[in-house]
Protein backbone atom coordinates (compact mmCIF):
# COMPACT_ATOMS: atom_id res chain seq x y z
CA UNK A 1 0.00 0.00 0.00
CA UNK A 2 1.33 3.44 -0.96
CA UNK A 3 2.44 5.71 1.86
CA UNK A 4 -0.08 8.58 2.33
CA UNK A 5 1.24 12.10 1.75
CA UNK A 6 2.04 14.27 4.76
CA UNK A 7 -1.05 16.40 4.13
CA UNK A 8 -3.21 13.28 3.93
CA UNK A 9 -1.70 11.91 7.15
CA UNK A 10 -2.45 15.15 9.00
CA UNK A 11 -6.03 15.07 7.70
CA UNK A 12 -6.45 11.46 8.88
CA UNK A 13 -5.14 12.49 12.31
CA UNK A 14 -7.64 15.37 12.43
CA UNK A 15 -10.54 13.02 11.57
CA UNK A 16 -9.49 10.55 14.26
CA UNK A 17 -9.21 13.39 16.78
CA UNK A 18 -12.77 14.47 15.93
CA UNK A 19 -14.04 11.07 17.04
CA UNK A 20 -11.92 11.27 20.19
CA UNK A 21 -13.34 14.71 20.92
CA UNK A 22 -16.90 13.36 20.78
CA UNK A 23 -16.32 10.27 22.91
CA UNK A 24 -14.12 11.96 25.53
CA UNK A 25 -16.25 15.10 25.77
CA UNK A 26 -19.33 12.93 26.24
CA UNK A 27 -17.63 11.23 29.19
CA UNK A 28 -17.34 14.51 31.14
CA UNK A 29 -19.85 16.98 29.71
CA UNK A 30 -22.78 15.03 31.19
CA UNK A 31 -21.49 15.44 34.76
CA UNK A 32 -22.54 19.09 34.97
CA UNK A 33 -26.02 18.15 33.74
CA UNK A 34 -26.58 15.55 36.49
CA UNK A 35 -28.40 17.80 39.00
CA UNK A 36 -30.72 19.14 36.26
CA UNK A 37 -31.41 15.59 35.08
CA UNK A 38 -32.03 14.49 38.68
CA UNK A 39 -34.65 17.18 39.17
CA UNK A 40 -36.40 16.67 35.82
CA UNK A 41 -36.27 12.85 35.83
CA UNK A 42 -36.61 12.41 39.63
CA UNK A 43 -33.49 10.23 39.73
CA UNK A 44 -31.69 8.78 42.77
CA UNK A 45 -27.94 8.76 43.29
CA UNK A 46 -27.88 5.27 41.75
CA UNK A 47 -29.86 6.57 38.77
CA UNK A 48 -27.32 9.34 38.23
CA UNK A 49 -24.51 6.79 38.46
CA UNK A 50 -26.14 4.61 35.80
CA UNK A 51 -26.37 7.48 33.31
CA UNK A 52 -22.57 7.62 33.47
CA UNK A 53 -21.72 3.97 34.06
CA UNK A 54 -24.09 2.38 31.54
CA UNK A 55 -22.02 4.23 28.95
CA UNK A 56 -18.66 3.44 30.51
CA UNK A 57 -19.32 -0.27 31.15
CA UNK A 58 -20.56 -1.00 27.63
CA UNK A 59 -17.70 1.00 26.18
CA UNK A 60 -15.13 -0.86 28.27
CA UNK A 61 -16.68 -4.24 27.50
CA UNK A 62 -16.67 -3.84 23.71
CA UNK A 63 -13.43 -1.93 23.07
CA UNK A 64 -11.21 -4.98 22.60
CA UNK A 65 -13.80 -6.69 20.41
CA UNK A 66 -14.03 -3.56 18.26
CA UNK A 67 -10.25 -3.30 17.95
CA UNK A 68 -9.77 -6.93 16.90
CA UNK A 69 -12.78 -6.80 14.55
CA UNK A 70 -11.36 -3.71 12.86
CA UNK A 71 -8.00 -5.46 12.43
CA UNK A 72 -9.89 -8.32 10.77
CA UNK A 73 -12.59 -6.77 8.52
CA UNK A 74 -11.23 -3.27 7.96
CA UNK A 75 -10.49 -0.31 10.21
CA UNK A 76 -12.22 2.34 8.12
CA UNK A 77 -15.35 0.19 7.84
CA UNK A 78 -15.64 -0.31 11.61
CA UNK A 79 -14.72 3.33 12.31
CA UNK A 80 -17.47 4.60 9.97
CA UNK A 81 -20.01 2.21 11.52
CA UNK A 82 -19.04 3.52 14.96
CA UNK A 83 -19.63 7.12 13.87
CA UNK A 84 -23.10 6.23 12.59
CA UNK A 85 -24.07 4.36 15.78
CA UNK A 86 -22.62 6.97 18.16
CA UNK A 87 -24.36 9.83 16.36
CA UNK A 88 -27.68 7.95 16.28
CA UNK A 89 -27.31 7.08 19.98
CA UNK A 90 -26.69 10.76 20.79
CA UNK A 91 -29.89 11.74 19.00
CA UNK A 92 -31.86 9.08 20.89
CA UNK A 93 -30.42 10.26 24.24
CA UNK A 94 -31.53 13.82 23.51
CA UNK A 95 -35.09 12.59 22.96
CA UNK A 96 -35.28 10.22 25.96
CA UNK A 97 -38.57 10.76 27.86
CA UNK A 98 -37.26 9.29 31.11
CA UNK A 99 -34.35 7.63 32.88
CA UNK A 100 -35.54 4.14 31.87
CA UNK A 101 -35.05 5.20 28.23
CA UNK A 102 -31.94 7.32 28.69
CA UNK A 103 -29.85 4.51 30.17
CA UNK A 104 -30.44 2.07 27.24
CA UNK A 105 -29.84 4.88 24.72
CA UNK A 106 -26.54 5.63 26.48
CA UNK A 107 -25.65 1.97 25.90
CA UNK A 108 -26.36 2.36 22.18
CA UNK A 109 -24.13 5.42 22.16
CA UNK A 110 -21.39 3.48 23.93
CA UNK A 111 -21.57 0.60 21.43
CA UNK A 112 -20.75 3.11 18.72
CA UNK A 113 -18.07 4.75 20.83
CA UNK A 114 -16.33 1.40 21.30
CA UNK A 115 -15.68 1.36 17.53
CA UNK A 116 -14.04 4.79 17.55
CA UNK A 117 -11.11 5.41 19.91
CA UNK A 118 -9.16 2.11 19.67
CA UNK A 119 -9.81 1.88 15.94
CA UNK A 120 -8.77 5.52 15.48
CA UNK A 121 -5.53 4.83 17.37
CA UNK A 122 -4.92 1.80 15.16
CA UNK A 123 -5.51 3.96 12.06
CA UNK A 124 -3.03 6.53 13.39
CA UNK A 125 -0.43 3.85 14.20
CA UNK A 126 -0.66 2.41 10.69
CA UNK A 127 -0.74 5.85 9.02
CA UNK A 128 2.26 7.30 10.87
CA UNK A 129 4.90 4.61 10.37
CA UNK A 130 7.91 6.72 11.43
CA UNK A 131 8.47 6.34 15.18
CA UNK A 132 9.18 10.03 15.85
CA UNK A 133 6.28 11.21 13.68
CA UNK A 134 4.01 8.69 15.39
CA UNK A 135 5.05 9.99 18.81
CA UNK A 136 4.14 13.53 17.75
CA UNK A 137 0.79 12.31 16.41
CA UNK A 138 0.09 10.51 19.69
CA UNK A 139 1.04 13.74 21.49
CA UNK A 140 -1.63 15.58 19.48
CA UNK A 141 -4.06 12.77 20.31
CA UNK A 142 -3.26 13.13 24.00
CA UNK A 143 -3.71 16.91 23.80
CA UNK A 144 -7.18 16.50 22.26
CA UNK A 145 -8.05 13.94 24.95
CA UNK A 146 -6.99 16.38 27.64
CA UNK A 147 -8.83 19.25 25.99
CA UNK A 148 -12.08 17.31 25.61
CA UNK A 149 -11.97 15.94 29.15
CA UNK A 150 -11.15 19.32 30.66
CA UNK A 151 -13.61 21.29 28.52
CA UNK A 152 -16.52 19.04 29.46
CA UNK A 153 -17.65 20.83 32.67
CA UNK A 154 -17.59 24.45 31.36
CA UNK A 155 -19.10 23.48 27.99
CA UNK A 156 -21.73 21.34 29.70
CA UNK A 157 -22.56 24.13 32.15
CA UNK A 158 -23.05 26.64 29.34
CA UNK A 159 -25.30 24.28 27.38
CA UNK A 160 -27.39 23.20 30.37
CA UNK A 161 -28.02 26.77 31.55
CA UNK A 162 -28.78 28.23 28.13
CA UNK A 163 -30.56 25.39 26.30
CA UNK A 164 -31.11 22.50 28.71
CA UNK A 165 -29.46 19.20 29.60
CA UNK A 166 -30.58 17.51 26.37
CA UNK A 167 -28.34 19.86 24.39
CA UNK A 168 -25.21 18.10 25.69
CA UNK A 169 -26.08 15.31 23.25
CA UNK A 170 -26.92 17.61 20.34
CA UNK A 171 -23.31 18.77 19.97
CA UNK A 172 -22.35 15.29 18.78
CA UNK A 173 -24.65 15.40 15.75
CA UNK A 174 -22.82 17.88 13.46
CA UNK A 175 -19.39 16.63 14.54
CA UNK A 176 -20.36 13.00 13.95
CA UNK A 177 -21.85 13.65 10.52
CA UNK A 178 -18.85 15.73 9.41
CA UNK A 179 -16.40 13.09 10.67
CA UNK A 180 -18.35 10.38 8.81
CA UNK A 181 -18.26 12.28 5.51
CA UNK A 182 -14.52 12.94 5.84
CA UNK A 183 -13.83 9.33 6.83
CA UNK A 184 -15.55 7.91 3.75
CA UNK A 185 -13.61 10.36 1.57
CA UNK A 186 -10.10 10.47 3.04
CA UNK A 187 -9.34 7.64 5.50
CA UNK A 188 -7.63 4.69 3.74
CA UNK A 189 -8.82 1.17 4.47
CA UNK A 190 -6.37 -1.08 6.32
CA UNK A 191 -6.40 -4.52 7.89
CA UNK A 192 -4.00 -6.65 9.89
CA UNK A 193 -1.94 -9.11 7.84
CA UNK A 194 -2.78 -11.88 10.31
CA UNK A 195 -5.88 -10.84 12.26
CA UNK A 196 -7.11 -12.79 15.23
CA UNK A 197 -10.13 -15.02 15.12
CA UNK A 198 -13.24 -14.05 17.10
CA UNK A 199 -13.32 -15.05 20.77
CA UNK A 200 -17.00 -14.96 21.85
CA UNK A 201 -16.39 -16.79 25.14
CA UNK A 202 -13.71 -14.33 26.18
CA UNK A 203 -15.94 -11.42 25.20
CA UNK A 204 -18.85 -12.73 27.29
CA UNK A 205 -16.54 -13.21 30.28
CA UNK A 206 -15.33 -9.59 30.00
CA UNK A 207 -18.93 -8.31 29.87
CA UNK A 208 -19.93 -10.45 32.87
CA UNK A 209 -16.90 -9.27 34.87
CA UNK A 210 -17.31 -5.53 34.29
CA UNK A 211 -21.11 -5.53 34.43
CA UNK A 212 -21.41 -7.53 37.65
CA UNK A 213 -18.75 -5.50 39.50
CA UNK A 214 -20.30 -2.19 38.51
CA UNK A 215 -23.87 -3.30 39.29
CA UNK A 216 -22.82 -4.65 42.67
CA UNK A 217 -21.04 -1.46 43.72
CA UNK A 218 -23.78 0.92 42.52
CA UNK A 219 -26.74 -0.98 43.93
CA UNK A 220 -25.15 -2.16 47.21
CA UNK A 221 -25.98 0.99 49.27
CA UNK A 222 -29.72 0.58 48.61
CA UNK A 223 -29.91 -3.25 48.44
CA UNK A 224 -27.42 -3.90 51.25
CA UNK A 225 -23.86 -5.18 50.90
CA UNK A 226 -24.87 -8.58 52.25
CA UNK A 227 -27.99 -9.03 50.13
CA UNK A 228 -28.11 -12.16 47.92
CA UNK A 229 -28.18 -10.10 44.71
CA UNK A 230 -25.08 -8.08 45.61
CA UNK A 231 -23.15 -11.09 46.92
CA UNK A 232 -24.13 -12.96 43.76
CA UNK A 233 -22.79 -10.09 41.63
CA UNK A 234 -19.38 -10.22 43.29
CA UNK A 235 -19.26 -14.02 43.09
CA UNK A 236 -20.08 -13.79 39.37
CA UNK A 237 -17.33 -11.21 38.93
CA UNK A 238 -14.79 -13.44 40.69
CA UNK A 239 -15.82 -16.48 38.65
CA UNK A 240 -15.66 -14.46 35.42
CA UNK A 241 -12.16 -13.22 36.24
CA UNK A 242 -10.88 -16.71 37.03
CA UNK A 243 -12.56 -18.12 33.93
CA UNK A 244 -11.08 -15.37 31.77
CA UNK A 245 -7.55 -15.97 33.03
CA UNK A 246 -7.77 -19.74 32.58
CA UNK A 247 -9.57 -19.70 29.23
CA UNK A 248 -7.50 -16.99 27.52
CA UNK A 249 -4.24 -18.65 28.53
CA UNK A 250 -5.13 -21.75 26.52
CA UNK A 251 -6.40 -20.03 23.37
CA UNK A 252 -3.95 -19.67 20.47
CA UNK A 253 -5.54 -16.31 19.58
CA UNK A 254 -7.10 -14.89 22.76
CA UNK A 255 -9.26 -11.79 22.98
CA UNK A 256 -6.78 -10.34 25.49
CA UNK A 257 -3.30 -11.67 24.77
CA UNK A 258 -1.69 -12.46 28.16
CA UNK A 259 1.74 -12.02 26.56
CA UNK A 260 1.17 -8.26 26.37
CA UNK A 261 1.27 -8.12 30.16
CA UNK A 262 4.78 -9.57 30.30
CA UNK A 263 5.83 -6.04 29.42
CA UNK A 264 6.00 -4.13 32.71
CA UNK A 265 5.36 -0.75 31.01
CA UNK A 266 2.28 -2.13 29.25
CA UNK A 267 0.91 -3.65 32.48
CA UNK A 268 1.73 -0.44 34.31
CA UNK A 269 0.00 1.65 31.67
CA UNK A 270 -3.16 -0.43 32.11
CA UNK A 271 -3.16 -0.02 35.91
CA UNK A 272 -2.39 3.71 35.59
CA UNK A 273 -5.20 4.17 33.07
CA UNK A 274 -7.70 2.54 35.45
CA UNK A 275 -6.44 4.59 38.42
CA UNK A 276 -6.25 7.95 36.65
CA UNK A 277 -9.68 7.72 35.07
CA UNK A 278 -11.25 6.39 38.27
CA UNK A 279 -9.84 9.46 40.01
CA UNK A 280 -11.13 11.76 37.24
CA UNK A 281 -14.65 10.36 37.10
CA UNK A 282 -14.94 10.30 40.89
CA UNK A 283 -13.53 13.83 41.12
CA UNK A 284 -16.03 15.22 38.58
CA UNK A 285 -19.00 13.31 40.04
CA UNK A 286 -18.21 14.50 43.57
CA UNK A 287 -17.56 18.13 42.65
CA UNK A 288 -20.58 18.43 40.36
CA UNK A 289 -22.94 17.42 43.16
CA UNK A 290 -21.07 19.56 45.70
CA UNK A 291 -21.00 22.76 43.66
CA UNK A 292 -24.64 22.62 42.54
CA UNK A 293 -26.45 20.85 45.37
CA UNK A 294 -24.43 22.06 48.36
CA UNK A 295 -23.11 25.45 47.25
CA UNK A 296 -26.23 26.14 45.19
CA UNK A 297 -24.48 27.18 41.97
CA UNK A 298 -26.25 26.89 38.65
CA UNK A 299 -24.80 24.63 35.95
CA UNK A 300 -22.95 27.43 34.15
CA UNK A 301 -21.21 28.75 37.25
CA UNK A 302 -20.41 25.22 38.41
CA UNK A 303 -18.76 24.62 35.04
CA UNK A 304 -16.82 27.88 35.33
CA UNK A 305 -15.67 26.89 38.82
CA UNK A 306 -14.05 23.87 37.15
CA UNK A 307 -11.94 26.02 34.80
CA UNK A 308 -8.94 25.70 37.17
CA UNK A 309 -9.09 21.99 36.33
CA UNK A 310 -9.52 22.58 32.60
CA UNK A 311 -6.78 25.16 32.05
CA UNK A 312 -3.82 23.15 33.45
CA UNK A 313 -5.08 20.00 31.71
CA UNK A 314 -5.23 21.88 28.41
CA UNK A 315 -1.69 23.22 28.82
CA UNK A 316 -0.13 20.04 30.19
CA UNK A 317 -1.61 17.57 27.67
CA UNK A 318 0.53 18.71 24.69
CA UNK A 319 3.47 19.31 27.02
CA UNK A 320 3.21 15.72 28.18
CA UNK A 321 3.29 14.51 24.57
CA UNK A 322 6.49 16.50 23.97
CA UNK A 323 8.05 15.12 27.16
CA UNK A 324 7.20 11.54 26.17
CA UNK A 325 8.65 12.04 22.69
CA UNK A 326 11.89 13.60 24.00
CA UNK A 327 12.49 12.00 27.42
CA UNK A 328 10.16 9.01 27.71
CA UNK A 329 7.12 8.41 29.93
CA UNK A 330 8.75 8.38 33.39
CA UNK A 331 8.81 12.12 34.23
CA UNK A 332 5.22 12.94 33.19
CA UNK A 333 3.93 9.85 35.04
CA UNK A 334 5.70 10.81 38.28
CA UNK A 335 4.51 14.42 38.06
CA UNK A 336 0.97 13.28 37.24
CA UNK A 337 0.73 10.89 40.19
CA UNK A 338 2.19 13.40 42.64
CA UNK A 339 -0.15 16.19 41.52
CA UNK A 340 -3.31 14.06 41.59
CA UNK A 341 -2.46 12.64 45.02
CA UNK A 342 -1.72 16.12 46.38
CA UNK A 343 -5.06 17.37 45.06
CA UNK A 344 -6.98 14.57 46.75
CA UNK A 345 -5.05 15.13 49.97
CA UNK A 346 -6.01 18.81 50.09
CA UNK A 347 -9.69 17.85 50.16
CA UNK A 348 -9.27 14.76 52.34
CA UNK A 349 -7.04 16.10 55.10
CA UNK A 350 -7.72 19.86 54.90
CA UNK A 351 -10.98 21.83 54.55
CA UNK A 352 -10.17 22.74 50.96
CA UNK A 353 -13.82 22.74 49.92
CA UNK A 354 -14.54 25.51 52.43
CA UNK A 355 -11.74 27.79 51.22
CA UNK A 356 -11.64 29.20 47.71
CA UNK A 357 -7.81 29.46 47.54
CA UNK A 358 -7.36 25.86 48.72
CA UNK A 359 -10.20 24.58 46.53
CA UNK A 360 -8.85 26.19 43.37
CA UNK A 361 -5.34 24.99 44.24
CA UNK A 362 -6.68 21.46 44.52
CA UNK A 363 -8.51 21.86 41.22
CA UNK A 364 -5.39 23.15 39.47
CA UNK A 365 -3.24 20.32 40.84
CA UNK A 366 -5.73 17.73 39.63
CA UNK A 367 -5.94 19.30 36.17
CA UNK A 368 -2.14 19.38 35.95
CA UNK A 369 -1.86 15.72 36.92
CA UNK A 370 -4.57 14.50 34.61
CA UNK A 371 -3.21 16.54 31.72
CA UNK A 372 0.18 14.84 32.10
CA UNK A 373 -1.06 11.25 32.37
CA UNK A 374 -2.76 10.58 29.02
CA UNK A 375 0.14 10.75 26.56
CA UNK A 376 2.49 8.35 28.44
CA UNK A 377 -0.31 5.82 28.90
CA UNK A 378 -1.21 5.84 25.19
CA UNK A 379 2.38 5.82 23.99
CA UNK A 380 3.38 2.95 26.28
CA UNK A 381 0.37 0.89 25.25
CA UNK A 382 1.25 0.84 21.54
CA UNK A 383 5.05 1.20 21.61
CA UNK A 384 6.86 -2.03 20.89
CA UNK A 385 3.70 -3.87 19.83
CA UNK A 386 3.50 -5.32 16.30
CA UNK A 387 1.55 -3.03 13.97
CA UNK A 388 -0.71 -5.95 13.09
CA UNK A 389 -2.00 -5.98 16.67
CA UNK A 390 -2.11 -2.22 17.15
CA UNK A 391 -5.90 -2.20 17.42
CA UNK A 392 -5.96 -4.78 20.21
CA UNK A 393 -3.09 -3.15 22.12
CA UNK A 394 -4.69 0.30 21.95
CA UNK A 395 -8.04 -1.19 22.92
CA UNK A 396 -6.60 -2.69 26.12
CA UNK A 397 -5.40 0.76 27.22
CA UNK A 398 -8.76 2.31 26.27
CA UNK A 399 -10.54 -0.47 28.18
CA UNK A 400 -8.48 0.45 31.22
CA UNK A 401 -9.58 4.07 30.90
CA UNK A 402 -13.27 3.26 30.60
CA UNK A 403 -13.12 0.61 33.33
CA UNK A 404 -11.59 3.22 35.59
CA UNK A 405 -14.28 5.75 34.63
CA UNK A 406 -17.02 3.24 35.50
CA UNK A 407 -15.43 2.18 38.77
CA UNK A 408 -14.73 5.76 39.85
CA UNK A 409 -18.36 6.81 39.55
CA UNK A 410 -19.58 3.53 41.06
CA UNK A 411 -17.24 3.65 44.06
CA UNK A 412 -17.55 7.37 44.83
CA UNK A 413 -21.33 7.29 44.37
CA UNK A 414 -21.60 4.25 46.63
CA UNK A 415 -19.48 5.97 49.31
CA UNK A 416 -21.70 9.06 49.17
CA UNK A 417 -24.90 7.01 49.38
CA UNK A 418 -23.58 4.76 52.17
CA UNK A 419 -22.37 7.80 54.10
CA UNK A 420 -25.77 9.42 54.14
CA UNK A 421 -25.40 11.96 51.32
CA UNK A 422 -28.15 10.26 49.49
CA UNK A 423 -30.14 8.42 52.05
CA UNK A 424 -30.27 4.82 50.82
CA UNK A 425 -29.77 5.77 47.24
CA UNK A 426 -32.02 8.80 47.34
CA UNK A 427 -31.05 12.45 47.13
CA UNK A 428 -32.30 13.91 50.38
CA UNK A 429 -28.91 14.42 52.02
CA UNK A 430 -27.19 15.91 49.00
CA UNK A 431 -28.10 19.49 49.88
CA UNK A 432 -27.05 19.33 53.54
CA UNK A 433 -23.45 20.63 53.84
CA UNK A 434 -22.59 18.76 57.04
CA UNK A 435 -23.90 15.39 55.82
CA UNK A 436 -22.29 15.83 52.43
CA UNK A 437 -18.92 16.76 53.95
CA UNK A 438 -19.04 13.74 56.27
CA UNK A 439 -19.89 11.37 53.42
CA UNK A 440 -17.36 12.93 51.03
CA UNK A 441 -14.39 12.53 53.40
CA UNK A 442 -13.73 8.84 52.61
CA UNK A 443 -14.34 9.54 48.91
CA UNK A 444 -11.51 12.09 48.87
CA UNK A 445 -9.16 9.59 50.52
CA UNK A 446 -10.03 7.10 47.77
CA UNK A 447 -9.19 9.70 45.10
CA UNK A 448 -5.89 10.37 46.92
CA UNK A 449 -5.13 6.63 46.83
CA UNK A 450 -5.75 6.53 43.07
CA UNK A 451 -3.24 9.36 42.62
CA UNK A 452 -0.66 7.55 44.76
CA UNK A 453 -1.20 4.42 42.68
CA UNK A 454 -0.39 6.38 39.52
CA UNK A 455 2.80 7.64 41.19
CA UNK A 456 4.00 4.30 42.55
CA UNK A 457 3.14 2.19 39.49
CA UNK A 458 4.56 4.87 37.18
CA UNK A 459 7.86 4.81 39.06
CA UNK A 460 8.00 0.99 39.14
CA UNK A 461 7.20 0.41 35.46
CA UNK A 462 9.23 3.11 33.71
CA UNK A 463 12.79 2.31 34.78
CA UNK A 464 15.55 0.28 33.11
CA UNK A 465 14.25 -3.10 34.28
CA UNK A 466 10.77 -2.27 33.01
CA UNK A 467 12.09 -1.13 29.63
CA UNK A 468 14.02 -4.40 29.32
CA UNK A 469 10.82 -6.41 29.83
CA UNK A 470 9.15 -4.33 27.10
CA UNK A 471 11.96 -5.10 24.64
CA UNK A 472 11.83 -8.82 25.42
CA UNK A 473 8.05 -8.88 25.02
CA UNK A 474 8.26 -7.03 21.69
CA UNK A 475 10.81 -9.52 20.34
CA UNK A 476 8.65 -12.49 21.39
CA UNK A 477 5.56 -11.02 19.80
CA UNK A 478 7.42 -10.28 16.58
CA UNK A 479 8.79 -13.82 16.43
CA UNK A 480 5.34 -15.25 17.07
CA UNK A 481 3.84 -13.07 14.34
CA UNK A 482 6.51 -14.00 11.78
Image: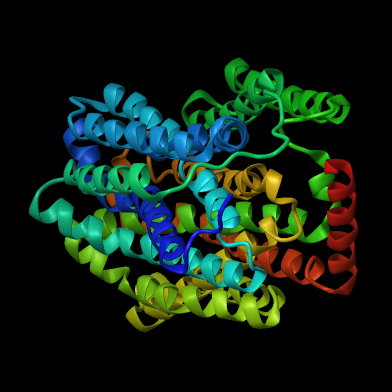
Q: Residue at x 21, y 27 (%)?
A: 96
Find residue 17 and report its horizontal and vertical position in percent: 41, 57
Can you name the residue that lies furthest to the front here?
2
Q: Residue at x 22, y 47 (%)?
A: 168
Can you name the residue that lies furthest to the top here?
228
In terms of depth relative to the viewer, which is nearer, 280 or 232? Answer: 280
Residue 418 visible (yes or no): yes
Horizontally, residue 227 falls left or right of residue 299, namely: right
Q: Residue at x 81, y 48 (%)?
A: 261
Q: Residue at x 54, y 58 (%)?
A: 279
* Residue 372 sits in quarter: bottom right
* Residue 445 sits in quarter: bottom right
Find residue 285 and report its horizontal and vertical position in percent: 40, 52
Find residue 162 and report its horizontal and vertical position in percent: 8, 55
In the image, residue 349 sits, relative to residue 397, either above or below, namely below
In the image, residue 339 sits, relative to residue 234, either above or below, namely below
Residue 424 visible (yes or no): no
Image quarter where the C terminus lies is top right
Horizontally, residue 211 falls left or right of residue 464, namely: left
Count the numbered circles shown: 0
Find residue 368 and report its horizontal and vertical position in percent: 49, 76
Horizontally, residue 277 falls left or right of residue 23, namely: right
Question: Which color scheme did the rendering employ for the protein?
Answer: rainbow
Amino acid sequence: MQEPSRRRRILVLAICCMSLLMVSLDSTVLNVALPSMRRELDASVAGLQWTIDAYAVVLASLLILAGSTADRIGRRRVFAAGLVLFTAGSLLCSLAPGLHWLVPFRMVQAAGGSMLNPVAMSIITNTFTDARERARAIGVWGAVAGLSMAAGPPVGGLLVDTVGWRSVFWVNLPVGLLALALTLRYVPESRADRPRRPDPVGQLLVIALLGSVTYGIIEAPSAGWGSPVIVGCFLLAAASLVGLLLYERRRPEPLIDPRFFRSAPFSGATVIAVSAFAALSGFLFLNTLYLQDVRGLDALHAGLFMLPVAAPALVCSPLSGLLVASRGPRLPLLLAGAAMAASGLLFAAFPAAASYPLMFTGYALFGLGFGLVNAPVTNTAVSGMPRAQAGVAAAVASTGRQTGAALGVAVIGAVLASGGAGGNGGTGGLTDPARFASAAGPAWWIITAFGLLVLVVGAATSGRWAMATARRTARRLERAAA
